[in-house]
Amino acid sequence: MVLGAGAWGTALAIQAARAGCAVALWARDASRAAAIAAARENPRLPGARLPEAVSVVTEPPATADLAVLAMPTQHLRSVLAGLPPIAAPLLACMKGVEAGTLRLPLEVVAELRPGVPAAVLTGPNFAHEVAAGLPAAAVVAAADPGLRECIAALLGTPAFRVYGNDDPVGAELGGAAKNVMAIAAGAVMGAGLGENARAALITRGLAELARLAASLGGRAETVMGLSGLGDLLLTCTGQASRNYSFGLALGRGETTAAALAGQSGVIEGVTTAPALVARAAGVELPICAEVAALLEGRRTLQQAIAALLSRPRKDE
């Protein structure tokens, strides 16, 4: 089953059906579920037809081989709290840090569903491309190798390669921080600073991700893979990235409120930036810190750029 009928949840439901699974796609809103079921298409993912193997439901089944959690990080707690127990492993498919508690998605899952096997799916994936069956790769991270193999078998196909990883903390941090870097990359391009500046920012952002992962219990090498480098390349350059588009608007001089109003979906990096900085207090995270200060109104874009460019030189 897939819990969450947004663009990503719908794409994952289509992919699971493509992999040979019968899928229940759960939507909280009954009228929205009925509309999707009738049209066999989600308006948030136009052009992507639901296969016959996907049923749209408003009551999640009590059992499943896998329960895919596909909602924004800030909604994960409320959704899980409102659901009855489900006899299935849980797969977190969101990227971010919970505001207030500063918890990663799997930490929220462990709190609300203690003892339930859980993993995280992350990597460089745009929903519309996965739904279309275009080639892509993702990483499923969990300590249990059997769980990783089970999830890869349920979701993987030749065109959607699912790799395993035993460092869920590093994978979650890479997926969360890349949204912050995408805002910064968008701001760089929106301000007309050029491709050289964006390339430098992505590269130094990767170093920042490695420090972040190592400091919070993950491994630096994890973010050199799909959940870090892969996601950075996609979201810092792809026009379909909401975080990048939001950053572009900031770079062109729009206020945070105006830039947010111009986006149709959730911009995870807006809440993730200050949460990451707070959780990793004492860790050198200059890009994340400047993005957080910009979003909170403590810096102008010009001040943030000046602060990053005036940092002391050192060996790479």
Image (cartoon, rainbow, N blue to C red):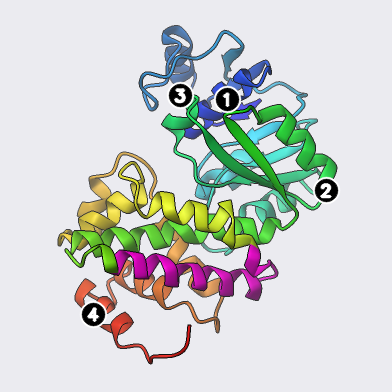
Residue that numbered label 2 is attached to: 144
The residue at which mark 3 appears reads as 132
Q: Earlier in the sequence, mark 2 or mark 3?
A: 3
Observer-nearest of 33 and 2: 2
Q: Position of residue 65 (x, y in %)?
A: 77, 26
Q: Which residue is mark 1?
A: 15
Q: CA distance from mark 3 to mark 4?
A: 42 Å
Name the residue at 46% across, 58% down.
178
Q: Position of residue 142 (x, y in %)?
A: 75, 50
Residue in view at x 74 percent, y 45 percent: 118
Q: Earlier in the sequence, mark 3 or mark 1?
A: 1
Magenta segment = 197-221
Q: Residue at x 41, y 61 (%)?
A: 180
| Marks 2/3: CA–CA distance | 31 Å
Label 2 element class: loop
Q: In the rendered structure, which amino acid carries the disc numbered 2?
A: Asp
Distance in Å between CA atoms under marks 4 and 2: 45 Å
* Earlier residue among tags 3 and 4: 3
